[in-house]
Amino acid sequence: MNDAADPHFVHLRLRQLRRTVLSAAVLNGTSVALGMLLIVLLVHAVLGMSAASSASVGVIVALIPDMPRARRGKWLHLIVAPLLGLPLFLAVQLLRGHPLELGLLLVPATFLAFLSTAWGRPGMPVAAGLMFAMLLAMAPQPAANAHEAWLRTGWCGLGAGLYVLWATGANAVLNGRYRAQTLAELLLTVAALLRTHAKRVTRLPQEPGTRQRPDALGEVLLRQAALAEQLQAARDLILEAPGSARRQQLAGMLVVVLEMRDRLIASELDIERIQASQAAGLQQLAAVSRAMADDVEQVADALLLGRRPPAARDHGAILRALHQQALEEAGDQADAGEVMHQAALLHSASVRLADQNGAVRQLAALARGEQAPDLSAVRSGWQLFVSPAYWSSQPLRGLLRWRQPAFRHALRAALAVGAGYGLALLQPWGSRDYWILITIVVVLRGSLAQTLERRTERVLGTLAGSALAVGLLALHPPEVVLLAVVVLAQGLAHAFVVRKYVITAVAGSVLGLVLAHLLYAGSSSAFDFAERVGDTLLGTALAWGFSYVLPSWERTRIATTVRRVCRAMAAHARQSLALATLAEVTGQPELAWRLARREAYDALSTLVQATRRALVEPRAVQPPIALLEQLQAHGYQLLGQLSAVQSTLLLRRERLQLDRLAAPLADAAREIQAQLDLDTPCAAAAPGPASEDADATLFGVPEALPDPRVADSSPWLLRRLALATGLAGVVRGDALAVLDELATVPKPSVNRPAPPP
């Protein structure tokens, strides 16, 4: 059926549009646009149009790092780009009439600017800000003398300084709203994961003897990786100083979301082993997952709209009935081992979904103010869960090593900018030599995959945005209207730079053409369009070509990530299995467990994302993709087993014989740590061929499941411990196989073109 013909299509699109409009990104973009408008209008009214145009460049340099973030350290992240960018702006002004000297400045300055990407996400806006400070300084006509260059720099600094003050204050005022919006967007991601799980339940092969292939987990793994990245941004914002009642409420909801993420992974266990005889039960499980997704979305929409959400529905009765039905079927055929086996599996799946049901109801109760948040571990140690607010010197250690990715990316960018500048000087037109360079800066990313993604969106966005700008300039509107267009375009470009870059490319093209028209009046708008498109195509081609120069292929870094995954899994297992010794889960032990759990998820997500990026790299330098996907699938299953163990220890302690489980728990913890210590000899399960069923090594021996009619949960916990221990051996085998393949020097003879992105 065509989506457009769906009677709910318009409603769903309108709901999605409403969520986008109410998102933190759009609010942040609105704040950016309003701040820019006020500053530019103020400077225009006091100092005139020329000063306002230069001040707008300073605002652009300062606003690039302005994203929704914690209050702590906000100004430190904003001030770096203006402080370092203003001297570059002045130098370009002084050298604008000297092409050779200007080129000798641009290349090393680009190298130094891109070295800031060593700080990761916080450093990338700084690099962009420094580059825009130089490149936008090339837009006006050359300064008549040094005094005019200094004057323009002063106006640029005035705009940047005013914007830093504006952004710091706006972030403080909007911080509470940002927290609610960020949590709402996180909940929408969790709801999407619940729906993905429901789809997997109904699509699984149900014939006896069939197993799920590792690539069937691909969508789940990618969604989990995106969720891990989104969770860290949410932690940074929501867990900062949870002192007030509202902050504690949102922080408590975030803690519940973390538990729901565990339940989601645990709910994947055993589902693929339920056969076609239980298809009706699987359909009910999928229906409950979809209903819980609806409840989570209602909480998210209520946060966006500032309303009190409805209470979440309780699906416990449905799940208990499903469990009882399976038991009755097993009772009717007590001598049929396979029937009892299927009943036990359905019992296990329904119990874990019931845990998720409880978490969703708790989430809604917290949002409604009917339950107090439990922040025993987070309240006193929230600093451990958020990213540091200061600029650490740690990334500088070893930065100038040849194999260091940030160093190679800086060299690559400097060479690309140098080539682009030389090409710009040779063009028959020369009024917009910086357009090629801006395109290179925004398209050239640290990896080939990111560059290819930006390449297409940049070209399409430039074509559309340039056409819009030319049409606007052909109407010859007043300068104040053009300033308003610049502000609006900047707000849109800023709001969608992460969410949908093609919109940013459209808005950025409008911004670039109109701002260039204001800074360098008198040019033809028709020629601007042709020049803009031509320069964009040239810049995009250069960025694409230079992405293969001094490349940092994922192969060179994946070995470190694989070892990180194994270390993180071992620490997570140690902390999870130690929960049985706690009389109550509060304080420092819980804090250590939560930190270990976060690192395990983050490490596996990093591996998933690296493997995804490697798919578009030349095959000659690709890491062993199939083995990596197998490692990810088994690592994901190990996380699920540990999550199931943790849930049993925390939620069903009264049904456990803890005195008899102490020794098995300790033994399992030691064995898992030994298996995941890749530097110590240890017998590990040998990985099967990557093209074969990933679960074959786990279920090769028939398993005697616990009797689902017995209330004691200890046998189920022992089963989870055995499966987790076996999985640790399989993960070790996968990891060692990957490391062995990575140690093999790639053969140039297999250097075939990469598949299209």
Image (spheres, grey):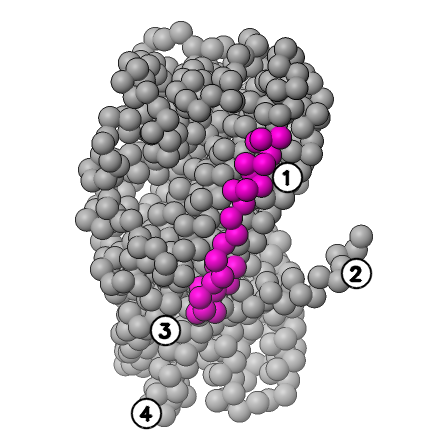
Give how far apart the Cα atoms at labels 3 and 1 are.
55 Å
Mark 1 or mark 4: whose residue is earlier in sequence: 4
The residue carrying pointer 1 sits among few (fewer than 14), some (14 to 19) or many (20 or more) residues within 10 Å by Cα, namely some
- Residue 458 is inside the magenta segment: no
Residue drawn at x 28%, y 69% is: 172
Of badges 4 and 2, the one in the foreground is: 2
Give how far apart the Cα atoms at labels 4 and 3 are.
17 Å
Q: Secondary structure at mark 4?
A: helix
Can residue 582 be spotted in the picture?
A: yes
Indicate the position of residue 386 as horizontal and vertical percent values. 28, 49
- Residue 317 is inside the magenta segment: yes
Query: Which residue does the numbered mark 2 point to in the structure image?
Result: 5
Mark 4 or mark 3: whose residue is earlier in sequence: 4
Q: Based on the displayed image, in which of its 4 quarters is residue 668 positioned?
A: top left
Residue 112 is tagged as none
- C-beta proximity under 8 Å, tags 2 and 3: no
Residue type, mark 4 in image: Val
Residue 59 is tagged as 3
Q: Secondary structure at mark 2?
A: helix
Give how far apart the Cα atoms at labels 2 and 3 are.
45 Å
Give how far apart the Cα atoms at labels 2 and 1 are.
28 Å
Mark 2 or mark 1: whose residue is earlier in sequence: 2
Residue type, mark 2 in image: Ala
Query: Which residue does the numbered mark 4 point to in the structure image?
Result: 46
- C-beta proximity under 8 Å, tags 3 and 1: no
Residue drawn at x 57%, y 10% is: 702
Q: Secondary structure at mark 1?
A: helix
Q: Is residue 350 above or below residue 34?
A: above
Query: Which residue does the numbered mark 1 point to in the structure image?
Result: 284
Residue drawn at x 55%, y 42% is: 317
* Overall secondary structure of the magenta section: helix
